[in-house]
Amino acid sequence: MSAGVSTLPAASRPETPMQRAWRRLKARKAAMFGLVVILALVLIAIFAPLIAPFDPTRQSWAAVRKAPSALHWFGTDEVGRDLLSRVIFGTRASLAAGVVSVGIAVALGVPLGLLAGYGPRWADTVLSRITDAMLASPFLILAIALAAFLGPSLTNAMIAIGVTATPIFIRLTRGQVMTVKVEDYVESARAVGNPRWRIAVKHILPNVMPQLLVQITLTIAMAVIAEASLSFLGLGQQPPAPSWGSMLNSAQRFLTNAPWMAIWPGLAIFVTVLSFNLLGDGLRDAFDPRERG
Amino acid sequence: MLALVARRLMQLVPTIIIVSMMIFGLQQLLPGDPATIMAGEERDPEVIEQIRKQYRLDQPIPLQYVYWIKGVVKGDLGESMRLKEPVSRLVAQKLPVTLQLAAMAMLIAILIGVPAGIVSAVKKDTPWDYIVNVISLWGISTPNFWLGILMIFLFSVHLGWLPASGYVSPFENPWQSLKTTIMPAFVLGNSIAGVLMRHTRAAMLQALSSDYVRTARAKGLGETRVILAHAMRNALTPVITLGALEFGTLLSGAVLTEQIFTIPGFGKLIVDAVFNRDYAVVQGVVLVTSATYILLNLLADLGYILVNPRLRT
């Protein structure tokens, strides 16, 4: 049936929305920079044991608070641990926190958003009120309170951040569903007798994806800062496991003698968050139908 | 207008009830017996029993909530286990400090963010625009606790110009107060400035391409007048409303900033409470913060309606 289409020369084949978005994204240098840095960070996190020159938890009393040198490129900390190795291993906690907590928020928020937007009216009323209530509390304060009650650990920090970010996805999905559900193709799918859940998953969800992708990227940036903040306060990754947030906490106490301790973990957070923000901005422009090109 | 205000207030009631349930529900997340956990180091069964009675932990959960919310409505947020003081008094002591910090931060954010956003829109696609975009991305992507540490290193440790920590009330010594709060306020305002720059730029670009600006130009008005009197006036309305909504971010940011600069405000209160397992204080702070945030949202909404007559119907 599609034989005619497949024999068309590539140039005349219509571009799918995803292909167009990718082409536009590739044209944006800042977004591509973000994407490349994120991919590099993922590789660093995966291959941390191979890249790191030292064991990130090994203490050495002979190398306490050493300034950056040929042996220790980023210097050492207050118990002689190699900072470069700790920054490299810290990538794992930060990326894991970003991805897992946003994963939790998406896994909870998207189905609930679909239910609110395309389910029974009472579900919308209840979910919208809960969303309003959760968004009424400042993000980090709610995450801190949740982490405090759950107990300090990286897993609990991820749960706290994920749950706190959930209403963002409920509201976004609901809003998008509201726009999409009056479109002709959804009406037609309903007219031919598709059940509601099938319409929601097969017809509505794919059309909500672009906005979701943008939000996921920007929320990961927010989650990375939130994890670093919780770890800075001692509510996230527990010592001696390395985390950029907790490294900054100890750096603060040695600012006079070892200022380099404060530079690298902060720079790592900044570069990670910046990359996700750049990619998110790029994706938003790439998916925006008003943008030309 | 009055009917509209009443309607908005009514809409807030379920939100406030759910927020209070959520905050009360936090207590249920504690692993094990809340009374034992709340007692902390204290292992005396009598003390634990007294806590159980005092917080009515022996009653069913819905009833516990009713007792708690009754107290909250009367201004009773419970008692700090550690400081043996009513939470409401602690909140009343610490809130002004954070509000001063937040107000200063907002002022800094507006002074940087709005003019930069206007310049960026007016000089679109020029080096000015790129510089503003870079600054805004810096503001949005920099963790404020890192910026705080770097500033302490530069201005306190290295140059010795400003104190690294501490707080002086403006009523005690205004100059000293400014010196102790200017760095934390800048750190807090930095990220909001980034957000405001983006909003201002977007709103100005929209205003500059609108018909009334074209008409103003066609009338032969000078460019400065067109930008300042015509475009800016309309573009700033949503920006100011969005600024009010950013207040929540300020309250969140204050937690870490106060921790770094050892400022005895709201943020430090919640962090100290978290580490001392002083759960009534944690709940109280979250409740008051949420209530403040809800109130600001309402004021922002009403302000927006007030300046935008089309929304009044």
Image: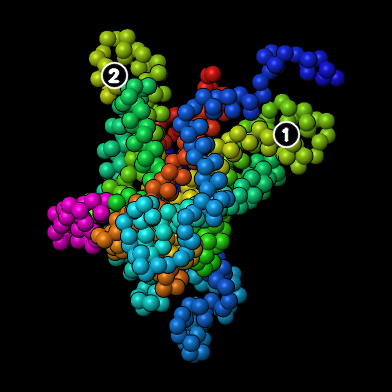
* Residue B14 appears in the rendering: no
**Residue under label 2:** B226
| Neighbour tally class for label 1: few under 14, some 14-19, many 20 plus, Cα within 10 Å | some
Output the chain of dot 2.
B
Decide whether residue B86 is among the magenta residues.
Answer: no
Output the chain of dot 1.
A
Q: Residue at x 67, y 43 (%)?
A: A114
Q: Residue at x 38, y 55 (%)?
A: A72
* Residue B88 horizontal side relative to residue B19, left or right: left
**Residue under label 1:** A203
Q: Residue at x 49, y 54 (%)?
A: A52
* Residue B191 horizontal side relative to residue B34, left or right: left
Examine the rendered structure and indicate whether residue B217 appears above or below residue A116.
above
Q: Secondary structure at mark 1?
A: helix
Q: Secondary structure at mark 2?
A: helix
Q: Amino acid at mark 1?
A: His
Residue A111 x %, y %: 67, 46
Examine the rendered structure and indicate whether residue A151 appears above or below residue B176.
below
Query: Residue B113's quadrant in the figure?
Result: top left
Query: Residue A7's quadrant in the figure?
Result: top right
Residue B69 x %, y %: 49, 67
Between the residue at mark 1 and the residue at mark 2, the CA separation in whole angstroms equals 47 Å
